[in-house]
Image (cartoon, helix red, strand yellow):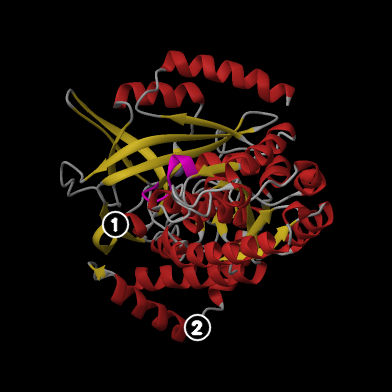
Amino acid sequence: MKYEFWLVVGSQFLYGNDVLETVDQRAREIASKLTEVLPYPVVYKVTAKTNKEVTDTVREANYDTSCAGIITWCHTFSPSKMWIDGIRDLLKPWCHFATQYNIEIPNEDIDMDFMNLNQAAHGDREHGFLGARLRKPRKIIAGHWTDENVHKRLSAWMRSAVGAAVSKDMKVMRFGDNMREVAVTEGDKVEAQIKLGWQVNTWAVGDLVKEMDAVTDAEIDELYKVYETSYDIATENTEAIRYQAREEIAIKKMMDREGCRAFSNTFQDLYGMEQLPGLASQHLMAQGYGYGGEGDWKVSALTAIMKAMGEGGNGASAFMEDYTYHLVPGSEYSLGAHMLEVCPSLAEGKPRIETHHLGIGMNAKDPARLVFEGKAGEGIVASLIDMGGRLRLIVQDIECVKPIMPMPNLPVARVMWRAKPDLATGVECWITAGGAHHTVLSYDVTAEMMRDWATMMDIEFVHITEDSTPEKLEDELFIKDIAWKLK
Ligand code: MN
């Protein structure tokens, strides 16, 4: 899907045609500049002067699947009562862009004509009141339209809005149920569809095995070549790699047939399969599909959404699990990995394909998997949990490091990070908020983007930062619990 954003400019008839023509021309210029520098095109739709023009544009936006959001701005004063019906009915993400055409006040030239043409300073306040009065979620970005920081913020908001569009279109294919007895990976699929748009449904593992049996040698040869180009093959066991290719091709066919962008499976239900999909799941994730282990459909869909929000529409975001800690004073880190399935978009260097014995689950043969180290850099981990009656998105700021030891006997991909504000406080906060052991780790989706996404989806957002303490967080969660029950 190719997404675009619509620029809707507010005005009125009071100023005469000359002014309206100037506004129209400048709106075109701004849309064209923003299209040049932002990740998605900005299409100038209208300078709205009446209730009908606003509501017609909003209706069109609501029904146009390529429109991922609207950006509004008031070059001149635009009385807000004419925006009530449109904004009330708006179903797409909304950014109120409080900018103005000129960057400076022209000392010599400024007169009342200039003032009447360039009055965003009060036009945007009238526009802002209506958003506040309607309690309509919106992103407010203020600053000049040529400013780089403004571009960065608009770009991040656009990515969140695309995340919302992808979410509303999300279908998750489940193979097998939730891992027996696990609580945090459970959730209300009806609530998830109402709030997030996710269609989460199950397919039989037997159907997948049938699909696998129908994969041809030629298809496997072709995918094997892709593996050879992308990764270093560090095993003699080519049969195991070919088996993973067979699994990948079959899963992909089934997902594409159903329009699914994410899937989950469980090592407890691999009936008829020789290996837990490792390399298969990893390479599917590299192509932008979401994945969740142990039946975790929530983390699977969130992985696909965050990937779509990342750089180039398939960023460095991956299904992750907090595994074990390094608690040496002054050098405290989390080690994240999974049984097999860590997305190579996190990798520093070229991943290796290895085969090893896997003791957990039904694995008749040693599964092939990608092994690598994660990159260093700022990132986040995100977890979506079901609080009973509502969904809570928890995001924690982290600093990924090059793993401080080689761990030569660890047969899986690994990422090492320091949680904010520090490991112990960070863990206390995470546990206080109820965050899962499964997360999406991202290098290119920011906490602000996830906050905006949560606002668009109307779900609770909790952010653990450099400044968090368990005490402050407990108070925050207590207030939010009451607020969300009343909402
Ligand atoms: Mn797991």
Task: Where is residue 325? Give x, y as percent.
Answer: 28, 31
Looking at the rendering, the stretch of residues picked out in magenta corresponds to: 442-449
Quadrant of the image containing the C terminus: top right
Q: Earlier in the sequence, mark 2 or mark 1?
A: 2
Q: Secondary structure at mark 2?
A: loop
Reply above or below: 56 against 428.
Answer: below
Q: Nearer the viewer, residue 314 or 92?
A: 92
Tell me the amino acid under the disc marked 1. Ala
Residue 216 is marked as 2
Q: Secondary structure at mark 1?
A: strand
- Whether residue 358 is in magenta: the answer is no
Q: Quadrant of residue 439?
A: top left
Write the residue at 66% across / 55% down: 9
Task: Where is residue 368? Give x, y as percent.
Answer: 34, 63
Q: Is residue 295 left or right of residue 217?
A: right
Task: Where is residue 404? Give x, y as percent.
Answer: 16, 41
Residue 347 is marked as 1
Visible in this render: residue 268?
yes
